[in-house]
Amino acid sequence: MSNAIPEYIYESVRSLPPLPAAVERLLAMSREPEVDFRKVSQVIESDPALTARILRAANSAFYGVSRRVQTVRQAVVLLGHEVVINLALGVSVLNLKRNLLKQWPGDPAAFWRHSLSVALMARELARQLKLTDTEGAFVAGLLHDIGKLVLLSHHGVVYAQTLLAARQSSDPLYLLERELFEVDHAAAGYALCQHWNLPEALAQAVAEHHADEPPASGTIAELVYDANELIKRLGLGDSGNAFTTLRTGPLPPHRRLTFDRLQELVRQLISELEHTEAILEGPSHRDTLPTLPARSRGTVHLHLRDPQMVDLLRVVLWAMGYEAVVIGDAESSPASSPRLLGLIADTSIPATRRFAYEQHGIPVLTELFPPHTPHVDLAALRRRLVQAFNHQTTAAS
């Protein structure tokens, strides 16, 4: 990765604020073969602001401690030194991130919410899959888009204009970045992680969240890559990049869960967002907190051979309030499906089946995006779905 990063990026990150001295000392201690709990506590206590945040977080539902935590030493003992060090790193990075966000051309709260949602999702995927470094996954999720702020800090107005132009582009943001700046935000973020001497697993997660090949299975990088794609498909926050990527490869982490379980995790994540923002002192706008539709707006049938497209549409449709049902060639007539709003199909659908839907006035959507495309414009996809199904919803009512 480092060979692909222009020297000007390294020069730029060296000009950015360093991590707090206490956090640098904690990271150095975390690399030692044996970590002394007392020394960890002493380092945190040397920074009053960090102490206050650690105690507030330790006493929150976020960590589920059953009794009141009154001292940093209690927090280290109850949560473990790895959790506390990662928490210290997370709150410190977000504090620095707030200063960089002052130049963000869009809604900084939405960008923050995207990063936090990715962090929560990566952490929960790690838990569900019984992986060990759940807190490392959380911090890596917080950091994954930090390279956008590096580019914004260096290029200023030019990068801000690139972010705005990306909303109308036919290519993802990171491809525009490579074309214009010889580097994308993932590589720029990796350079900053190196400058801060962060653990390599976290740095690699930042570096690989737009990798041409999916990251290695079971790594923090894989969790962050998958969480980032999921959060964009769910529409939680705004990263400045409206595209999701369809790639073949190993089964991604979220598809190792049932879809019902994934839905439960997303509902839990949304309920945690405001509380977690308060712990980390992020912007909280109660009137803009994301919600899921209270009830289903109707059913949409899917007749698709590509499992990646099925997965994408199930997530997007569910987040929009529609129930997606995967059907085969031998399913019953569309007349037997109440509140059926449409059929999304590919070229594998038999002509007789397509005709049956059209005869019942059910719209059949094909070519939602170009065939064999690796990148899907989520904003355009949602507009197309709303346009097709709103008419059916109005007619049904």
Image (cartoon, rainbow, N blue to C red):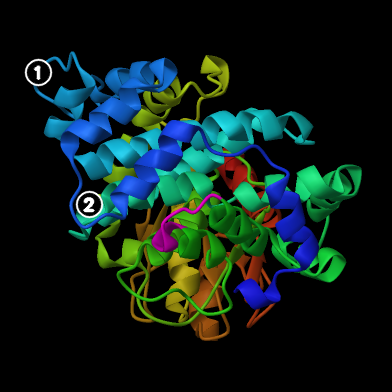
Q: Is residue 226 visible?
A: yes
Q: Comparing marks 1 and 2, which lies closer to the viewer?
A: 1
- The region drawn magenta spans 196-202
Which percent across, then down, holds residue 93?
52, 37
**Please, what is the three-letter code of the amino acid marked with disc 2?**
Arg
Q: Is residue 279 magenta?
A: no
**C-alpha gap between disc 1 and disc 2:** 22 Å
Amino acid residing under circle 1: Arg
Q: Viewer-proximal residue, 291 or 346?
A: 291
The image's mark for residue 127 is 2
Q: Nearer the viewer, residue 29 or 99?
A: 29
Residue 101, given in percent of the width and then of the height, sits at 69, 33
Residue ID at (52%, 64%): 343
Q: Which residue is mark 1?
A: 67
User: Residue at image x 37%, y 80%?
Assistant: 250
Give coordinates of residue 182: x percent, y percent: 80, 70
Mark 1 / mark 2, whichever is N-terminal: 1
Magenta region includes residue 198: yes
378 left or right of 205 in image: right
